[in-house]
Image (cartoon, coloured by chain):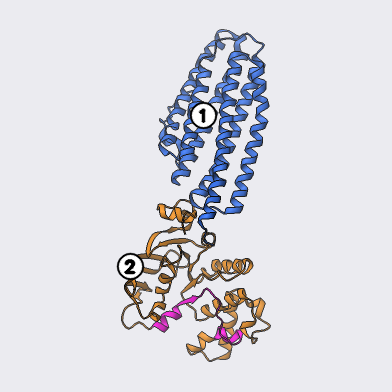
Amino acid sequence: MMMTIDSRNHIEEELGSLKREALYLAALARESINRSVWALKERDKAVAMEVIKKDDEMDDLARSIDQKCLQFLARFQPLGEDLRTVLSIMHMAVDMERIGDYGDNIAKVALDMSDQLPIKPLVDIPRMAQLFSQMLDRCMEAFDRCDVETAMTVFPMDDQMDDIETQILRELLFMMMAKTERIEQATQLLTVARTLERSGDRVTNMAERVIYICTGETVRASGFRRPKQEGTL
Amino acid sequence: MAKDITAIEVTDLNLNYGTTHTLKNISMRIKSHSVTAFIGPSGCGKSTFLRCLNRMNDFIPSASVSGSVMIDGRDIYAPGVDVIELRKKVGMVFQKPNPFPMSIYDNVAFGPRIHGVKDRTILDGVVESSLRGSALWDEVKDKLHSPANGLSGGQQQRLCIARTIATEPEVVLMDEPTSALDPMATAKIEELCRQLKEKYTVVIVTHNMQQAARISDDTAFFLMGDLIEFGPTDRIFTSPEDKKTGDYITGRFG
């Protein structure tokens, strides 16, 4: 049957509340990465424990968003942009929940390393975390305002993320070669760098989703990034 | 007719009711053996356009049509076209089931009889195959000579579809065929549409967007006499190109 203006208001309300919850989940994901990297850098056990505790809240929220999307689909049978939005929120919630897991992983490394003497002061890993925050902020700003241009700016930032990871990898390899006692800690830091790189990938996925919501077109971030070089790490 | 062949080609069709310009420069290619849905708010011209495809607007004295509608390589608006033959080739099912006040059998046999079929065995065959084709046979085979008015609304609508396909049309036009039916009866007609396209080209006007999304291959969106967008249903309902289409399918107006 034909919809009336009333049902449009109802749809807007429900969609608005779904969007707000997605934005909140993104804020939690951002915090999870930032706080866990802080805990790692500052050897702060308490903060690491907090991050691990918070992960359950993120899982619950992601599940609740998923459930609400399902109910929205069943109740409104949305089409067009509404359909794209709900479907994309479902995907994005998975990405964000996964970023939360990454934060949880980093926090566990932080706990593990908190009693060890650091092999080096952490500079690049916090830089990656900062870059990740910027990517996520832009992505969420684009999502909130349905702004394709802002979403597009996320893609090249993922290249920078990869660059820093490669740099970290090189540095740690040299450190390990020079002194084998460093291997254990260096390996853990490598894992953290890889985890942050994956968080960036997740945000890139989300930015693709935002563009899909706004335009209906499926873009691949790889088309907006520099070509992969042969033989790079 | 094979798939992806044009069944109906409309070029620059205009229709005026008196001084009201109801359809404006409509051009469209409807694919053979597919289901094409027309959607749009009330008064957008979708039913009027559907009726142009078998010249049902001829019955409205103030209606004047220009442009061409090619079916089987012939313009149905060309002088000398046999309108009765045309309507045999392009059958129609209406919003409200309208069985004739006669038996189920006679309803289905009505068209073939008008077109000169008298042989009882042939008629029996046509009645059975048409009722099977409209998924009604199993429900009525034991009461073919009972009055059609005794059937439920959904059965009556399927009887009307049987009556339409009894004359072996190429195209079946449906003008909101389920708007008077309950969900179960609607589901049966929708399933039937999918089956009908194996043998016929189906064009359906519907107010129910989800219905259009479920059953059609292509969808046309009309607004105030203009064809705004026409394309694969999969695209129209997920990523329409025109903002007006997007606004309509998300219920921003209508």
Q: Mark 1 points at which residue?
A: A200
* Secondary structure found at label 2: strand
Circle 2: residue type: Thr
Chain in orange colour: B
How far apart marks 1 and 2 lie (CA) works out to 52 Å
Is residue A210 visible to us here? yes
The verdict on residue B107 being magenta is yes
Identify the mark at residue A104; answer none if there is no mark. none
Q: Give the range drawn in magenta.
A: B83-109
Chain letter for mark 2: B
- Horizontal and vertical percent position of residue B88: 45, 81
Quarter containing the N terminus of chain A: bottom right
Q: Which of A16 and B246 is in front in this view?
A: A16
Colour applied to chain A: blue
Q: Name the residue under label 2.
A: B11
A163 versus A206 height, above or below: above
